[in-house]
Amino acid sequence: MAGRVRRLLGRTAGCPDRLSEGEPVTTPLTLQLKRHVPADRARVWRAWTDPAELARWYWPASFETSCQVDLRVGGRFRIASAAADMAVSGEFAAVDAPDRLVHTWRWDGEDLETLVTVEFLAADDGGTDVVVTHERFTDPGQCADHAQGWNDCLARLIAHDFSAADR
């Protein structure tokens, strides 16, 4: 799966040797990224949990993303792209609106199941600091590939049009 994502995005991913501001922090088999989003927590929560809105920003527009979200503990989600021939799904372990989501993560066709925690922290300027922690990787290369994917994903969230929630 990681190779397919690299081909679709047109670059290779890798863990940085030195961290600069905004770069992911990786520890063995865990990665954590923090980004500031210029919208309040309730609004960012909705962008992350509403299936129609999630599909608009999560992956590149060319992926023609579709999302299903059963937002409850034990509920499942699925993010899929027929255009890119890939999908990821998981089960929610914690749903604490608008503070935190915890869910499993498994790419279609792969056995590895990892764990993702997303925290939505109120920032002093009225925006939201989003912290993504992705853990339980079994290979450093997988961790590096996912660091690049989350970097790209969070960049799209920051650029998302939060004023257009109901289109």
Image (cartoon, grey):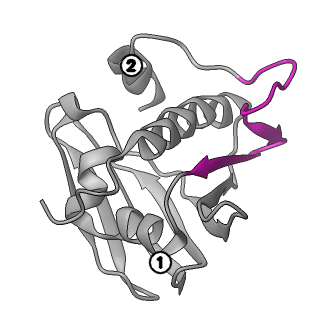
Q: Nearer the viewer, residue 154 or 89?
A: 154
Type of residue at label 2?
Leu
Residue 122 locus on image (x, y percent): 66, 70
Residue in view at x 73 percent, y 31 percent = 23
Q: Is residue 54 visible?
A: yes
Residue in view at x 59 percent, y 60 percent = 127
Q: Which residue is mark 2?
A: 9
Horizontal side of 18 relative to 150 (left or right) equals right
Q: Nearer the viewer, residue 149 or 167?
A: 167
Q: Which residue is mark 1?
A: 92
Locate residue 63: give its quadrant: top left
Type of residue at label 1?
Phe
Residue at mark 1 to residue at mark 2: CA–CA distance: 28 Å
Quarter of the image for the C terminus: give it: bottom left
**12 relative to 140, above or below:** above
**165 relative to 99, above or below:** above
Residue 56 falls within the magenta-colored stretch: no
Horizontal side of 155 relative to 66 (left or right) equals right
Report the magenta residues as a range. Answer: 15-37
Residue 24 falls within the magenta-colored stretch: yes
Q: Earlier in the sequence, mark 1 or mark 2?
A: 2
Residue 147 locus on image (x, y percent): 63, 35
Give SS at disc 2. Answer: helix
